[in-house]
Amino acid sequence: MSSWGHRHVIDLATFSCDDLAKVLELAQRFRAMPFSGVRKLPALQGRFMTSLFFEPSTRTRSSFELAARRLSADVQSFSPSSSSLSKGESLLDTARTYVAMGADVLVVRHRCAGVPQLLAEELDRSGERVAVLNAGDGLHSHPSQGLLDLFTLARHFSAEAPTPEVLRGRRIVIVGDVLHSRVARSNLWALTACGAEVVLCGPPTLLPEAFASFVEAPPPGQAGDPVPQRGRVTLERDLDTALEGADAVMTLRLQKERMREHLLTSLEAYHRAYGLSHQRLKRCGKPVPVLHPGPVNRGVEMASALLDDPSVCLVEEQVRNGIPVRMALLYLLAAEAAAAPGLTAA
Ligand code: NCD
């Protein structure tokens, strides 16, 4: 296994084009496994992944657990409601408990931005060799979702060779609740690293002007941008205009649980202005795929008929691709740990 330089996966702002290429290449290989009759690889035998989900999840958690099992790792799941957190144990102490049991990777989801980063720093400081993989933190970042979206798009444009290059110059529209979406933020880093032109679309309450410069500087605390030249990001308030010439459209869930005040007049009005349908997609001028990270509010982000049309809507394909992408991340983190001085390979 060759190492790739990331001891943890927290945010795609730190990913170079080569890093993205490695994930896509491995994911493509892992994706072919069931077709070649292989159900499980022994690559991570003896390794141990713990999923620490402090926020609900359907897809991400099961996908990580399945990915780990396909690589023969042991898997343990933590449930906040039945844990000692309810007795006042701190988050870090909970994490340390699993590390003491031998966890090699902690997959962490939390409603507060920065929690996976904090755990990674604290565990590094105490010399632990465990890797932290962010499975979504507040509004900040959701790297594995950003990568599976990238893989799904790259495969759409080139099923045999889904490399970052196939995204170069493509017009990708991201529409909806960008403000509350960690998925949109991760996609912005990943897509612009590949040279895609991203058009963000939504009402000012859900898409502040500042997003136009989102990828212009690395996030606070990050020394530099690993990508020499990123694709452009533009804002367009009108969906019909945004769709003109689009190569793909990604729509985002209205994150009602994160809205502290009423940011919309009504769901009907939102659907009229920003909802996708077969009819509306004609504005693109050619057939284009539609992505959504799920869970979907049927009839809000997109018409039910569109959601149920797999020839256009790639939601299920995204879910399928989540497994090989997460296998790739777990594999690369294990390779990195094995390459660390003084440690032995699993
Ligand atoms: C996303 C999340 O949790 O950020 N879902 C997911 O992981 N597939 C998006 C969402 O909740 O809308």
Image (cartoon, helix red, strand yellow):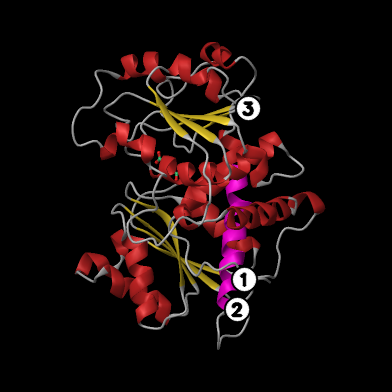
Q: Which mark is residue 268?
A: none
* Residue 163 inside the magenta-drawn segment: no
Q: Indicate the secondary structure of the residue bearing disc 3.
A: loop
Q: Which residues are magenta?
A: 319-337
Mark 3 and mark 2: Cα distance apart in space: 42 Å
Q: Indicate the secondary structure of the residue bearing disc 2.
A: helix
Mark 3 residue type: Pro
Residue 337: horizontal and vertical position, in percent? 55, 76
Q: Indicate the secondary structure of the residue bearing disc 1.
A: loop
Report the quarter where the N terminus lies: bottom right
Residue 243: horizontal and vertical position, in percent? 51, 19
Kindly identify which residue carries mark 3.
310
Kindly identify which residue carries mark 1.
3
Q: Measuring 39% from the left and 77% from the top, which residue is drawn there?
A: 124
| Among the 4 quarters of the image, the one containing residue 53 | bottom left
Q: Measuring 54% from the left and 52% from the top, which residue is drawn there?
A: 63
| Mark 1: few/some/many CA within 10 Å (<14, 14-19, 20+) | some
Residue 195: horizontal and vertical position, in percent? 57, 40
* Residue 322 inside the magenta-drawn segment: yes
Q: Which mark is residue 339?
A: 2
| Among the 4 quarters of the image, the one containing residue 39 | bottom right
Q: Measuring 23% from the left and 71% from the top, which residue is drawn there?
A: 89
Front residue (pair 212, 247): 212
Decide if residue 266 is on the left or right side of residue 230: left
